[in-house]
Image (cartoon, rainbow, N blue to C red):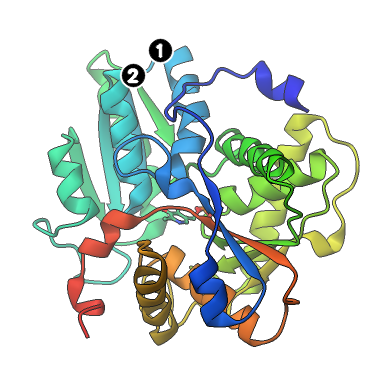
Amino acid sequence: MMNQLNTLPRRRYTAGPTPLHPLDRLSDTLGGPRIFMKRDDALGLTGGGNKTRKLEFLVADALEAGADTLITTGAIQSNHCRLTLAAAVQEGLQCRLVLQERVPGSYDPSASGNNLLYHLLGAEEIQVVDQIDKAPEAMEAMARALEAQGRKGYVIPTGGSNPLGTMGYVLCAEEVASQALDQGLRIDHLVCASGSGGTHAGLLAGFHATRRSIPVTGISVSRLRDEQEPLVRDLTLESLGRLGVKEPLPGMAVRVRDDFLGAGYSLPTPEMVEAVKLLARKEGILLDPVYTGKAMSGLIGMIREGRFQEEENVVFLHTGGGPALFADPDLLLS
Ligand SMILES: *Cc1c(COP(=O)(O)O)cnc(C)c1O
């Protein structure tokens, strides 16, 4: 499998592996299994987070294609847009963004958080659309406008979650498994946020390709289980296809919980607020309200349901998102 991956062009945005360490104060507080955290919030590029791993492959492909501008899309407070822009800055490329105003009236051009960083890092153009469905067409129009000027755009889909971007998390599966081996740690379960699906699918593909049967639970942050599971499954299968893995993926492998989503994407839940505060106060670690706060509320919920034995080791993947915490301080100021 690694042979297939080693031949793919890749840029490097992080110096070495991200830390994998225990959260003993949190484990004691919850009285459950031993909780470890994989710190992908510490990945490279401005502010870190999971999109950095996907961008190592996507931006390398853009450079191979001779692009001078990255074009991508995300919600109005998108970590993916911030990191794509950061990668463009590091590579000396331009970057244009299509922001999706998923909640009517929610776009505020002077908002803090990731929005502030779009401006600070110097996005060349920001366009706002009022429906997610309009984003692909808006990005194609941007690419055509560049072409008319003799330039070349490279379009990256939402969350960087195509089979190429997903390879970043195939490598992460390998990284976390070899760190666990070094630390003499048996991983019994891994929990992560599941959004556009590339992170979840890449981990599944990576573990499956290397015959590690580590169960992964994705906490859905935008879709119900009936939609999220097929999305993750398809992306996992496409990734395994690219890796040349023939062994069929067991039906049980794709596990999604949608009962920590609340009313929908980016809409707060009391459990998310509890999780963000708990991690801050017990571990001094910042989660975000949209992804990692809800994912951690899922892990806490699973522990309270008695899903894990006390001697089990559960890894929580911290996918980043810190800057989004500063978009809406009122959420946590109570
Ligand atoms: C994008 C994102 C996720 C979700 O990852 P996907 O690969 O889109 O499923 C999780 N956490 C943070 C902080 C993100 O920005």
Q: Residues within 10 Å of mark 2 (few under 14, many from 20)?
A: some
Residue 239 in which image quadrant: top right
Question: In the rendering, at what x and y percent does residue 253 appear?
Answer: 79, 60
Q: Is mark 2 on a helix, strand or loop?
A: loop
- Which of the two discs, 1 and 2, sits closer to the camera? 1
Question: In the rendering, at what x and y percent does residue 7 appear?
Answer: 66, 15
Q: Quadrant of the C terminus?
A: bottom left
Q: Residue at x 67, y 48 (%)?
A: 203
Residue 89 in which image quadrant: top left
Can residue 72 be seen here? The reply is yes
Q: Quadrant of the N terminus?
A: top right
Q: Which of 125 and 21 is in front in this view?
A: 21
- Horizontal side of 265 relative to 175 (left or right) equals left
Q: Is mark 1 on a helix, strand or loop?
A: loop
Q: Nearer the viewer, residue 168 or 95?
A: 168
Can residue 76 be seen here? The reply is no
For the residue marked with disc 1, what is the amino acid?
A: Gly
- Horizontal side of 22 relative to 1 (left or right) equals left
Q: Check contact, mark 1 vs mark 2: CB within 8 A.
A: yes
Q: Residue at x 74, y 25 (%)?
A: 2
Instruction: Please determine whether, in this image, residue 199 is positioned above or below residue 174.
Output: below
Question: In the rendering, at what x and y percent does residue 110 appear?
Answer: 8, 57
- Horizontal side of 49 relative to 309 (left or right) equals left
Q: Which residue is drawn at 13% across and 40% down?
A: 120
* Ligand 1 closer than 8 Å to label 1 CB: no
Instruction: Please determine whether, in this image, residue 288 is positioned above or below residue 246.
Output: below
Tag 2 residue: 152
Tag 1 residue: 66
